[in-house]
């Protein structure tokens, strides 16, 4: 089976299909960002994009309400508000969940996709209809679409690609640890328990909760990314917080740096506490003269260390002639 990677390769194909006026049917697992890809293509082509989730509408939303034309004395159908009506407009309309909705709704949608009309409605010429479905497997409650109808689409089987997602993630300010996790294990992007969507949600949760306690943070990350991946992302996040503490951090923000010390002590990471001690001692030994504010911040940070470590640093600083009293 030919697979197209979600990202630039898929966007190029959808753009080409739009220019050829060819409806596209995407087949892929959940969480790949199928609707977002269509929106990005539409933005690049400077056309509209409309996404309709079929699982939350009724057949009448596509078919239109029946009404009697008092002049012609015939039954017609009102214009569906959910569908494009501007005859001069251009765009892509995407129907999601096409193979997991009742047959009457599926039939209405398929006729719009293949015949460009249903009852009294006609899709404007500047628009192409597309659809997105999950594969027909035991994992999903889906139906097999009729082969004759599928033949009217450009059927594209898709899967996530780590390199493409990482490039997108960097451009969209996804948390660096989430990106680093995928860089470390690129195959995880296609793990059944993970998806680009869950990675994005995990990043958003972390970025929105910078001061949350560790238990709540871990529960949230695992709830989004699953036990295996969530726990690993949490461990990387905590390790990064420790490894990235520098003398600049200490001199400019002693209180925030002290949060790292508290975390290290709570987790009994004496190895990392010793590393941070070395950072301070090396700075003192270098003979650099801190500004008044930096000096105050350094003393404030030292005062937040465990008592025994305070004594060790003060003793060392005294031997170097570095003032540790205000």
Image (cartoon, helix red, strand yellow):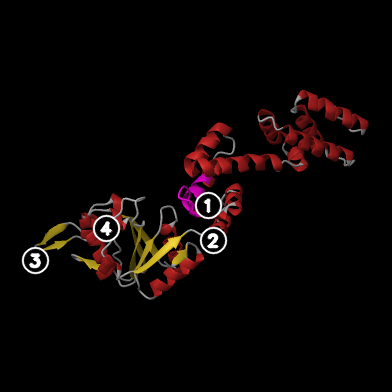
Which of pointers 3 and 2 lies earlier in the amino acid sequence? 3
Q: Which residues are magenta?
A: 190-202
Quadrant assignment, res 106:
bottom left
Is 240 part of what is drawn in magenta?
no
Q: Answer above or below: position of 240 versus 150.
A: above
Which of pointers 3 and 4 lies earlier in the amino acid sequence? 3
The residues tagged by marks 4 and 2 sit, at their Cα atoms, a distance apart of 36 Å
Residue 166, image x, y percentages = 56, 57
* Location of mark 2 (residue): 164
Residue 210, image x, y percentages = 59, 39
Position of the C terminus by quadrant: top right
The residues tagged by marks 1 and 3 sit, at their Cα atoms, a distance apart of 63 Å
> From where the camera sits, is residue 213 visible?
no
Instruction: Give yes or no for contact between labels 1 and 3 (Cβ–Cβ under 8 Å).
Output: no
* Location of mark 3 (residue): 71
Which of pointers 2 and 1 lies earlier in the amino acid sequence? 2
**Residue drawn at the location 49% of the way across and 54% of the way down:** 190
Instruction: Give yes or no for contact between labels 1 and 4 (Cβ–Cβ under 8 Å).
Output: no
The residues tagged by marks 3 and 2 sit, at their Cα atoms, a distance apart of 57 Å
**Residue drawn at the location 76% of the way across and 42% of the way down:** 248
Is 194 part of what is drawn in magenta?
yes
* Location of mark 1 (residue): 188
Q: Nearer the viewer, mark 3 or mark 2?
A: 2
Residue 108, image x, y percentages = 23, 61
The residues tagged by marks 3 and 4 sit, at their Cα atoms, a distance apart of 23 Å
**Residue drawn at the location 27% of the way across and 58% of the way down:** 81
Which of pointers 1 and 3 lies earlier in the amino acid sequence? 3
Decide which of 203, 32 is in the foreground and name it: 32
Which of pointers 4 and 2 lies earlier in the amino acid sequence? 4
């Amino acid at each position: 089976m030919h697979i197209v990677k979600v990202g630039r390769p898929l966007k190029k194909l959808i753009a080409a299909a739009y220019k050829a006026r060819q409806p596209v049917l995407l087949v892929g697992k959940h969480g790949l960002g199928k609707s977002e890809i269509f929106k990005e293509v539409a933005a690049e082509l400077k056309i509209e994009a409309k996404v309709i989730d079929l699982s939350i509408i009724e057949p009448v939303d596509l078919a239109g309400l029946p009404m009697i034309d008092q002049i012609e004395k015939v039954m017609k159908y009102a214009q569906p508000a959910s569908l494009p009506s501007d005859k001069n407009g251009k765009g892509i309309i995407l129907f999601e969940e096409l193979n997991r909705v009742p047959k009457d709704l599926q039939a209405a949608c398929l006729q719009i996709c293949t015949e460009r009309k249903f009852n009294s409605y006609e899709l404007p010429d500047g628009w192409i209809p597309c659809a997105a479905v999950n594969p027909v497997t035991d994992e999903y409650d889906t139906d097999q679409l009729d082969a004759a109808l599928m033949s009217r689409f450009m059927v594209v089987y898709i899967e996530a690609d780590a390199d493409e997602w990482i490039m997108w993630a960097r451009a969209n300010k996804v948390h660096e640890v989430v990106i680093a996790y995928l860089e470390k294990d690129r195959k995880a992007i296609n793990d059944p328990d993970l998806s680009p969507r869950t990675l994005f949600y995990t990043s958003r949760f972390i970025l929105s909760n910078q001061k949350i306690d560790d238990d709540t943070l871990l529960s949230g990350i695992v709830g989004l990314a699953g036990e295996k991946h969530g726990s690993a992302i949490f461990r990387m996040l905590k390790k990064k917080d420790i490894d990235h503490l520098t003398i600049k951090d200490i001199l400019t923000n002693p209180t925030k740096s002290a949060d790292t010390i508290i975390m290290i002590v709570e987790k009994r990471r004496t190895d990392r506490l010793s590393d941070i001690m070395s950072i301070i001692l090396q700075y003192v030994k270098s003979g650099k003269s801190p500004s008044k504010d930096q000096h105050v911040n350094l003393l404030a940070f030292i005062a937040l260390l465990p008592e025994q470590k305070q004594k060790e640093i003060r003793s060392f600083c005294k031997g170097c002639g570095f003032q540790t009293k205000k």
